[in-house]
Image: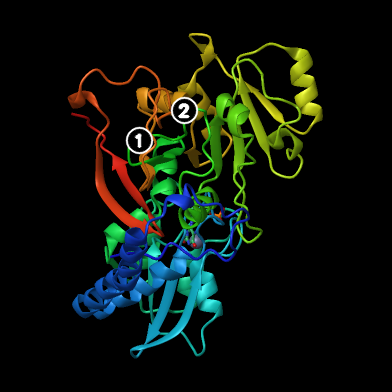
Amino acid sequence: MQVPTGGIAHEPKGTNRWNSDADSKVWMEEASLKKLWMPWIPGLFLFLRGFCMDGKEKYMALALSLAERGRGWTSPNPMVGAVIVKDGRIIGEGWHEKYGEKHAERNALDSATESVEGATMYVTLEPCSHYGKQPPCTDAIIEARLKKVVVGSGDPNPLVNGRGFEILKNHGIEVEYGVLEGECKALNKHFFHYITNKKPYVSLKYAMTVDGKSATEEGVSKWITGEEARRDAHFLRHSHMAIMVGINTVRLDDPVLTCHDPALRDPVRIVVDSNLDIPLSSKLVESAREVPLLIATVSNDEEKRGKLESSGCKVLSIPSSGGKVDVVRLTGEIGKMGIDSILVEGGGTLSWSFVENGLVDHVYAYIAPTLLGGRNALTPLMGKGFPSPDDGLFLENTSIKALGRDYLLEGDVKCSQG
Ligand code: AOF
Ligand code: ZN
């Protein structure tokens, strides 16, 4: 099943298209044809899938799409959706809207249009049974006298982890587990990874041409991909708690690393800068008071550190590995700060360090139908690379989608390589 990934409300500023002069008539015709049929594919898929779903799956699919509305806002908590059904009618809906705020179950109960006594709740995650920022959802369900709770996936949080089910059953509430379990688990892959491993989920993102270049030989990278792909990538920033780049990217591009959309949540920005070379005049440092900026370094330059800190940056001292920031230790430190996910946006040297150290969980490759050439043009991964094709990083659960004239190919990194 395909779960909607949420909409993006605004057009980004600066809509330059890469090499737009080279657009040929043939390409235009192909693109128009593609536009005619491409949007039908997901719709047709969902329509056919709808025929194959039983009632339970349909309600859980609705709960999943409600949960999706919380993407980017609930982290490091999970996204959760809930639907209440009585006599075949939906009488309540809700989702966990924002970190620290009410849980999905209570929002669904509050929205009910009639008495919920004897009704069934479809919820994407096991109801919590502990006091955190919110009281236990199991209490609310018991008080509401629901008859049955249908759950998509368990909650691996050690404070819950099966206790939610037990408490409901002990109060005579029927519990059914595992409806659309795969989809419910996939929805919260950042949360599941973080709560289980205590380390952030790492996504590697890059844009490249068909011939594998992420800039021209002169280092020009604005823009490899078109407007739609860039907007999609801004939504990726919103979906991760932190974004990370290396100092070379700061020097080359002077990026700001925000979502470029006031309706989206900007991630914490992290620069890996072993020698504290980041210019005080960079857009990142200049905006450090508006959007958090962490600088990870091995440098002991107290004067530069002081200047950065008085500009609003946080400087993180990380142990060195061969004179550079040890990315394994850095990732661990970021996890300790309560950050559940990192989007690594390059450049190639930093990305290679993450790949080399087995830290990458997922890859988002935006591919432009352009060829650039250039023996020394930058590629998404630099470093020394793997010695043989058999040693490479393999992706599984791959998918590809068209974004305007570009494509997004993504996949999970296979745990056991080879
Ligand atoms: C649910 N429904 O909608 C969510 C749950 O600090 P708190 O009180 O917000 O609790 C956070 C934990 O509760 C989180 O780590 C996860 O185990 C669970 N999240 N549970 O029943 C919800 N968001
Ligand atoms: Zn809860």
Q: Are marks 1 and 2 in contact (CB under 8 Å)?
A: no
Q: Nearer the viewer, residue 307 or 384?
A: 384
Q: Quadrant of the C terminus?
A: top left
Q: Which residue is mark 1?
A: 212
Q: Amino acid at mark 2?
A: Glu
Instruction: Find residue 187 and report its horizontal and vertical position in percent.
Output: 38, 57
Q: Position of residue 252 (x, y in %)?
A: 59, 29
In which quarter of the view is residue 312 placed?
Answer: top right
Answer few, some or many: residues within 10 Å of disc 1's Cα (few below 14, many 20 plus, some between 14 and 19): some
Mark 1 or mark 2, which has the lower sequence index?
A: 1
Residue that carries the numbered disc 2 in the rendered image: 217
To which quarter of the image does residue 34 belong?
bottom left
Q: Residue at x 47, y 47 (%)?
A: 19
Q: Is residue 175 visible?
A: no
x 49%, y 37%: residue: 345
Q: Element type at marker 2?
A: loop
Tell me the distance, in whole angstroms, between the alpha carbons under discs 1 and 2.
Answer: 12 Å
Most foreground residue, 35 or 298: 35
Q: Secondary structure at mark 1?
A: loop
Kind of residue at disc 1: Gly
